[in-house]
Amino acid sequence: MFDFIALDFETANQQQDICSVGASFVVDGKIEKQFESFINPEKPFSNTCIAIHGITQEDVTDAPTFPEIFTRFSPLLRHYPIVAHGAQFERSVITHGCERYSLQLPHLTFYCTSALFQYNYPNYKKYKLDWLCEMFGIPLMHHNALSDSAACANLFLQLLNDETTAIFPLRPTEQKRSYSGWNPIEISIQTDASEPRKRSLVMPNIQFDAFDSSFEGKRFVLTGEIGELNRDQFFDEISNLGGKVIENVSSKTDYVVVGAVDLDVVKDKDTYKTGKVIKAESIRESGGTIKIVSMEEVYQALQFDKMNFSDIE
């Protein structure tokens, strides 16, 4: 279980200019605080968008602009994963806003409840937010940004509380994905060749140890995907906190950090375990002190001093 921010935007037009934001801050498995605000898009509204959410130009006349809201939220968005239903949209909206106002776009980590439900529960009839909320008895006032964010938060908690689910973030280069049965996700990765190759990412079947957020003097081995940060940035963050990233697993290794893995390169095709995971399990079973921890827990602990959501008004 890890803390996160569930986020939802409503937009004024097809150019993705934001007119409303809703955020639900989740700590220790429950919504601790919520925030909502109209946003003045400083652009005309389209009738199509008004028909969806009911927000008009008059509603946002005195509302803050995107830079005013984003400046307040940017530190939190950097430090906590963002969860959204159809997270590609939220990511593109933030990217558009930063480009439009010449704001620096930080490295952000997104989880998509729509994609995760499709992957983990392939036999559901529908995966729209309102349909999933009805199925799980989650209250929803659809296209109200705050209500949508709360519903998304509760859907993500549903996934986290199910020990059979695979939880993985969106990648920066993620393109169209195919969900069919229990097949892994297909992601387009650009290589040196002219054509992108498809990689299938899966979560290994592992009994994770708890991560105690200890870095000083600890030796880390990474296996699998990191998410929005590149590997050098991830290594630097560990080093800044006194840890050391090493290449190979040994009895001197303190932590093996595991993310989603490429199905083509895993050593055990039944459990999706890499060679590093298999060796770490062998050391652990022989009485070694090595711990196998999830990428999500380490990612959240890195550089991320516990921030106080109550600071957001």
Image (cartoon, rainbow, N blue to C red):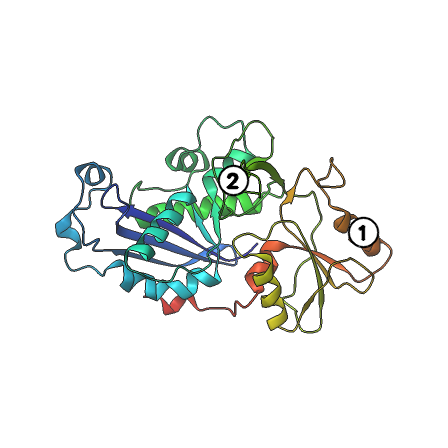
Q: Nearer the viewer, residue 223 or 304?
A: 223
Residue 27: assigned label: none
The residue drawn where x is 46% and y is 38% is 114
Question: In the picture, residue 255 is in which quadrant?
Answer: bottom right
Of the residues tagged 2 and 1, which is closer to the observer?
Answer: 1
Residue toward you, 149 or 223: 223
Q: Give the quadrant of the C terminus.
A: bottom left
Residue 85 in sight from this viewpoint: no
- Specify whether residue 122 is in view: yes
Between the C-alphas of marks 2 and 1, the distance is 29 Å
- Residue at image position (71%, 69%) is 218
- Please identify the residue farthest to the right as the structure is shown: 286
In the figure, 219 relative to 153: above or below? Answer: below
Q: Is residue 41 left or right of residue 260?
A: left
Q: Residues within 10 Å of mark 2 (few under 14, many from 20)?
A: many
Q: Residue at x 71, y 73 (%)?
A: 217
**Coordinates of residue 272 in the picture (x, y in percent):** 70, 40
Please name the amino acid that badge 2 sits on.
Leu
Identify whether 223 is placed above or below 53. below
Residue 64, picture quadrant: bottom left
Name the kind of residue labelled 1 in the image. Answer: Lys
Callout 1: helix, strand or loop?
A: helix
* Residue 41 position within the rendered picture, expressed as x and y whole percent measured from the top left: 22, 53
Q: Residue at x 17, y 38 (%)?
A: 47
Q: Quadrant of the N terminus?
A: bottom right
Mark 2 or 1, nearer chain start: 2
Secondary structure under tag 2 reads: helix
Which residue is label 2 attached to?
A: 116
Residue 81: percent from the left, percent from the top?
Answer: 48, 55
On residue 279, the disc is 1
* Other residues around mark 1 within 10 Å, as few (<14) / some (14–19) / many (≥20): some
